[in-house]
Image: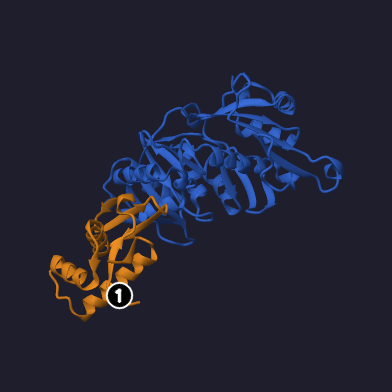
Amino acid sequence: MKVSDFTESSIARQLRRPGIWFRTGPFCTHLQTPIESVARAFHALYADFPLVENDGFADFHVRVASPRGFRRWHRPQALFFCDGERPFKPLDRRQAFAMFEWGFNWCVSSYAHQYVIIHAAIIERRGRAAILAAPPGSGKSTLTAALIGRGWRLLSDELTLIDPSRGLAVAIARPVSLKNASIDLIRGFTAGAVIGPRIEDTAKGAVAHLKPPADSVYRMDEPALPYWVVFPKFQPGANTSLASYPKANAFLRLADHAFNYCQHGVRAFHTFAELIDRCACYEFTYSNLDEAVAVFDALASGAPAATVGV
Amino acid sequence: MSLHREGRRWRVLRAEELYWRRWDEQYVVYDSGSGQTHVLDPAAALLIQLLGERSFEAFELSEKMASLLHVDADAEFQERLQQTLSKLEELSLIETASH
């Protein structure tokens, strides 16, 4: 059974109590919420994810709730709980679904230390994965959204999980977080894109989430071997440019984006070293999404790096 | 900071805790003692490898480096060596110790 096998009202009812157990890649999450906007967005954006029978176990027990007292009706707020703890301050209840997504990221990056976790997107085509690592505001999610709209498989928009014993990246295929101008940009770029509600005035500006392609969700148990490390940068008006980047510097930059490099220590060093050994590393500047997709498609088709460009 | 410290020898802090990788002309070294990772140029990497084998007095080190790199140990070379040693000391990769 998957989420879309149920109506929105049925999902909302189950989410209120006892909650829903669903799987994203290797993680089983138990989500409970009485907030209708969360239920609506969850039903639309997690439609293809499999439900899991409740056998009492979940990697994360998540609750998005309204506070007690007057904050239920005056400037209502939302609270995020993971395993009974509340790691964040309350947010405006209109931001409840965004809070769930951010909180979910927090759960994975705080607890899933069986993986080396990098703050980066990861996509795959023809069995080869590209890690897209960049600070917030660099256009990483916009590029990811454009590529998965044109046939690339989504493993993750925010968290690249590397199994250190095999060097393989694990997929979680959750919705892509779009911000500000990129929301309408992707709506126009990808025919049939399903984008959740636009949530205004968050700490990141306006936020909306893109439903992952069904194929990416169906294939989320397929790991992928990273083949490219790309540092993307959106620059208005810039020509599309893919330039080789020194591997030693790429190592350091990627390690800077890791959440748990220190926890893994020597194991993380060897994991990154093997990854960088295998991967071609690039800096990528773009302003035009069609050209950006063409560059990545050329990479995937095996064109030598020197000939890649538009 | 002077390269020549009276009666003192340069050495690596934790040679057995350093893990290396080389790509092109750059080295990445992970110091498991501090948890820090650094990118080093070949001269800095050579310095650490020499000092990992045994400690050196500054003059002796300068002669050895110049000989390995096939250059004269002139004033410019001495200055570059001093800068590199200072940088590596700042990164807590090397230190000076008495005999």
Residue A244 visible in rendering: no
Label 1, residues with CA under 10 Å away: few <14, some 14-19, many ≥20: some
Q: Colour of chain A?
A: blue
Residue underneath mark 1: B5
Mark 1: which secondary structure? loop
> Taking A31 as reference, is A166 left or right?
left
- Image quarter where the N terminus of chain A lies is top right
Chain letter for orange? B
Query: Which of A208/A287 is in front?
Result: A208
Residue A30 at x, y percent in the picture? 64, 28
- Image quarter where the C terminus of chain A lies is bottom left
Using the image, determine if residue A143 lies above or below residue A234: above
Query: Which of B83/A97 is in front?
Result: B83
Residue A283 at x, y percent in the picture? 38, 55
Task: Name the quadrant containing residue B77.
Answer: bottom left
Residue B50 at x, y percent in the picture? 22, 60
Total count of labels: 1
Using the image, determine if residue A222 lies above or below residue B74: above
Residue drawn at (27%, 67%) of the image:
B9
> Taking A134 as reference, is A79 left or right?
right
Task: Name the quadrant containing residue B92.
Answer: bottom left
Residue type for callout 1: Arg
> Taking A184 as reference, is A128 left or right?
left
**Chain to which mark 1 belongs:** B
Residue A96 at x, y percent in the picture? 70, 42
Residue A122 visible in rendering: yes
